[in-house]
Amino acid sequence: MTVHPASRESLLEEALGHGGPIIVFDGVSLAFDEKVILREVSFTLKTGHTKIFLGASGAGKSTILRLILGLLKPDGGRIFVNGEQVDRMSEQQLMAVRADLGMVFQEGALFDSLSVRDNVGYKLFEEGWPAAEANGRVQEVLGFIGLAEFIDRGPAELSGGQRRRVAIARAMAAKPKILLYDEPTTGLDPITSITVDEEIIKLRDLEGVSSILVTHQLRDAFYVAEHTAVRRGDRIEFEKASPDKCEEAEFIMLRDGRIAFEGNAGELRAAARTDPYIEAFLS
Amino acid sequence: MAGAVERIKSGLLEVQEYVRMLGFVGRSFVSRPFYYRDTVQQFEYIGIGSMTVVLLTGLFTGMVLALQSGLTLDQFGARSMVGRLVSASMVKELGPVLTGLMVAGRVGSGIAAELGSMMVTDQIAALRALGTDPIRKLVVPRIVAGLLMVPVLTVVATAVGMVGGWIVTVGILRVASTVYWNSVVQGLYIQDVWMALIKPFFLGFAIVSIGCHVGLRTRGGTQGVGRATTNAVVASSVAVIAVNYFVTQLLIVLLY
């Protein structure tokens, strides 16, 4: 299923409530020198939903996240985040947009010189939250990801999986509406990967965070798309998502800078039967 | 030919990015937020941290100056004038330049390596994603510390150099202590002192800004960090020598 660029302006006029468009790419293109990274890519992420980007290395998946944050500027097309066009904003204007965004970088990108507490609470301390309130929030998010006892350690003392989870905690500490994950499970063993996947599911289903997940770990992509988190008393349980819930997670496959597929998990499996590239990717 | 054109283009691009960074730095000086804690940390790293190397450099330079000038002045029977030569050389040139070169080696490389590592591990991108301007957070505190601490280090190096000259003059050349210090004072003019105090501001600014620029332009993993460190030391050392010449020429016109 190839998606052609289309004007999304009508979508932007909709309310930005649940199911409204929170991130819109409209014909976005980008090239580095001669190398074309993205060719007229268009998609819409709805509030509370998940987009999962698949594709070979160098297909432009991580670039999309950097464009959303304004760390890169597109050569053409428009990008809207939370109803604001970010592709022409100055660094100063982008700071306000970034307040609603959290990003989990590949390998975590934790600040080496700061403790876990200062990493997780970085944005809160920078924004001048009262110390008690900021520390309370840091403890809350570290408890949420199950790493409360690591609060005073340095990033160098954490395992790969713990670093990713602390990176998730840092990204969610200031309660952003949108979380962007750049290959959060790459290089992790399957058991640790599942714990990271479950954090992503918890944030989406229990905190109502919209998310974009870039990965080439299919197992994790399908796990996030087809599971849901449910709070039962003090416990959080993960179970198979209902067909309606599965609809809220959409896959996008990038190939040579274009969207080669866009649809839910079932449609992706069906497309693999007819498209040799997708079949090769999924096998 | 095509390679030469590419080199010129990439050189011009570096200059353009350096000037752009300085523009952002200038803007950050006149608007909030200002990171006081980070600035104090940099005062400690650049100022206190460089003290030992600057003390040793100043001391041995002053000592060797006294030895060499004593040898030459002996030919004219003017050994008592050693103090003049030591003070004039240390204050006008050797103090600022050698301090600049030492700081370039220690601080310029350190800044490029630190910021370069942060670049290749996405920590700078993470800072931006968390709403922090890396120029304000990382570059401005370092430049402020470089601007203020290199002059202090220069004064220390110069003073210690004179003490080193005194040790050799009294201990080896057998010149009386009062004769040496009188000669030191006679060799100094107020313009020389002004020059010694003004030049290090420019040198400190050049060293730190080049280190920051090279660090923030780092690409290509750990290999890139190694390359950035080498480039920062080479570029800031050459800048120290070149800036020293141009500022000296300007100050001669203005002061003398």
Image (tube, grey):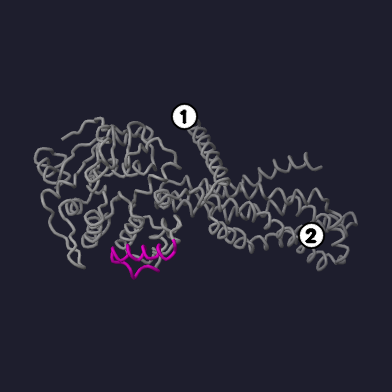
Which region shows up in magenta? Answer: A130-152
| Residue B144 vertical placement versus A138 (above, below) | above
Q: Closer to the camera, B188 or B161?
A: B188
Q: Which residue is mark 2?
A: B66
Q: How many marks?
A: 2
To which chain does the residue with label 1 belong?
B
Query: What is the distance, in whole Å, between disc 1 and disc 2 at their CAs?
Result: 52 Å
What label does residue A158 carry, if any? Answer: none
Whether discs 1 and 2 lie on one chain: the answer is yes
Label 1 is placed on what type of residue?
Ala
Asked whether residue A263 is in view, the answer is yes
Which quadrant of the view contains residue B244? top right
To which chain does the residue with label 2 belong?
B
1 and 2 marks in contact (CB < 8 Å):
no
Q: Earlier in the sequence, mark 1 or mark 2?
A: 1
The quarter of the picture where the N terminus of chain A appears is top left
The image position of residue B53, as x and y in percent, is 63, 61
Q: Residues within 10 Å of mark 2 (few under 14, many from 20)?
A: many
Q: Residue at x 66, y 43 (%)?
A: B243
Q: Residues within 10 Å of mark 1 (few under 14, many from 20)?
A: few
The image position of residue B1, as x and y in percent, is 49, 29
Q: Is residue A81 left or right of residue A221?
A: right
The image position of residue B65, as x and y in percent, is 76, 57
What label does residue B2 carry, if any? Answer: 1
Circle 1: element type: helix
Which quadrant of the view contains residue B174? bottom right
| Residue B124 vertical placement versus B180 (above, below) | above
The image position of residue B247, as x and y in percent, is 70, 42
